């Protein structure tokens, strides 16, 4: 029995040794073989050097180094593609995903044959900026209302999956990826372990409010066509209101004459309609852009260097 540990890394030279030491402690407790697959996602620090040294110490600590930064989604996809274990887990290297939870996760999978995946879910967001926590909760409420798949509030990418679920995920080779949605879309029986938020052990996060906001937009566009429906309904309502206003103006002119229209009201209507048109064009452009990138059929990532011990790759 082997567990593949997929670990995306971006400027994590300080965190990798701490993560590896903690994972080795958990491995000894579990009595299970680990194969590590670290993905260097175009780091600008000494992450790659640290991974090379670690591979020399432990040949089962494999690494993949991208030619540039392709993003966490590409790193996750690359790790899953190269994972060979019976079980596969996805983890953050900053130890915000508590490694000791793997013990309980594997125990549940071993006890319940019908269970395909054990995920993790944060029940608190202590240490995060309040505005980030607020928008995160709003995102899950929104996406679960407009999407056909349910995404659990607070769910992390950190999960332990059986091989059939991993193979199903790899069948989705789309360029525009949103792993939380993909994990939910493929189905499979999943249970969640709850835990309290854990702070990073070292380094600085590469995620800020703006990057998380863009990531949430990607999730909405990838797993819902609700924005297109909103644009259509909004345009229909605007046309209907404009028609009513035309009738009102014609009737008023015939009955009361043609009084001079107010400049503020005229500009308000023009700005409202113009702004709504730009919004709908932007929504359409977002979906068209997704289609454009998919039709190019570019690879999700490009590998510059990788370890090849035991002919893993």
Image (spheres, rainbow, N blue to C red):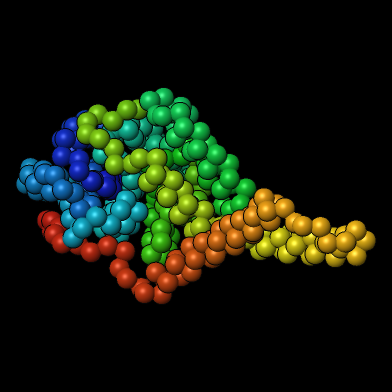
Residue 265 pos. (x, y %): 70, 52
In the image, 82 versus 252, the foreground residue is 252
Give the image location of residue 11, x and y in percent: 20, 43
Q: Position of residue 44 (x, y in %)?
A: 16, 48
Q: Quadrant of residue 195?
A: top left
Examine the rendered structure and indicate whether residue 13 appears above or below residue 268. Answer: above
Left or right? Give the position of 268 relative to 140.
right
The mark tally for this picture is: 0
Residue occupying image coordinates x 48% and y 63%: 286
Give the left or right position of residue 229, taking residue 41 as reference.
right
Is 48 positioned to the left or the right of 299 in the image? left
Where residue 254 appears, x then y in whole percent? 90, 65
Question: Observer-nearest residue: 179 or 235?
Answer: 235
Does residue 35 appear anywhere in the picture?
no
Identify the residue at horizontal 29%, vertical 42% (top origin): 206
| Furthest-right residue in this view | 255
Residue 22: quarter of image: top left
* Nearest to the observer: residue 204 or residue 33: 204
* Residue displayed at 40% across by 29% down: 128
Task: Work out which quarter of the rendered image holds the C terminus and state it.
Answer: bottom left
| In the image, residue 217 above or below residue 311 | above
Q: State whether residue 45 is above or below residue 224.
A: above
Can the viewer see residue 112 in this picture? yes
Residue at (23% x, 64% y) in the render:
302
- Is residue 14 positioned above or below 235 on the image? above
In this rendered view, identify the residue nearer to me: 213 or 192: 213
Task: Kindly indicate the quadrant of the structure image that contains residue 209.
Answer: top left
């Amino acid at each position: 029995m082997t567990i593949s540990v997929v670990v995306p890394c971006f400027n994590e030279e300080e965190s990798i040794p701490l993560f590896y030491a903690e994972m080795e402690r958990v491995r000894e407790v579990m009595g299970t073989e680990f194969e590590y697959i670290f993905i260097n996602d175009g780091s600008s620090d000494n992450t790659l050097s640290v991974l090379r040294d670690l591979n020399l110490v432990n040949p089962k600590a494999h690494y993949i180094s991208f030619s540039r930064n392709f993003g966490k989604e590409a790193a996750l996809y690359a790790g899953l593609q190269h994972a060979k274990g019976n079980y596969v887990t996805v983890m953050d290297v900053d130890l915000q995903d508590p490694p000791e939870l793997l013990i309980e996760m594997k125990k549940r999978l071993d006890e319940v044959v019908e269970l395909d995946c054990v995920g993790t879910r944060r029940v608190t967001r202590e240490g995060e900026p309040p505005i980030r926590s607020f928008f995160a909760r709003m995102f899950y409420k929104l996406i679960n209302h407009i999407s056909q798949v349910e995404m659990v509030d607070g769910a992390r990418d950190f999960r332990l999956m059986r091989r059939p679920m991993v193979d199903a995920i790899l069948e989705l080779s789309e360029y525009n990826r949103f792993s939380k949605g993909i994990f939910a879309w493929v189905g499979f029986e999943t249970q969640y372990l709850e835990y309290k938020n854990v702070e990073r052990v070292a380094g600085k996060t590469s995620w800020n409010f703006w990057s998380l906001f863009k990531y949430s937009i990607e999730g909405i566009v990838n797993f819902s066509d609700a924005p297109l429906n909103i644009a259509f309904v909004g345009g229909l309502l605007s046309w209907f209101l404009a028609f009513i206003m035309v009738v009102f103006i014609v009737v008023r002119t015939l009955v009361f004459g043609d009084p001079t229209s107010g400049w503020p009201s005229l500009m308000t209507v023009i700005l409202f309609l113009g702004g709504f048109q730009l919004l709908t064009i932007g929504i359409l452009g977002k979906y068209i852009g997704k289609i454009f990138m998919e039709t190019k059929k570019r690879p999700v990532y490009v590998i510059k260097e990788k370890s090849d011990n035991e002919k893993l790759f």
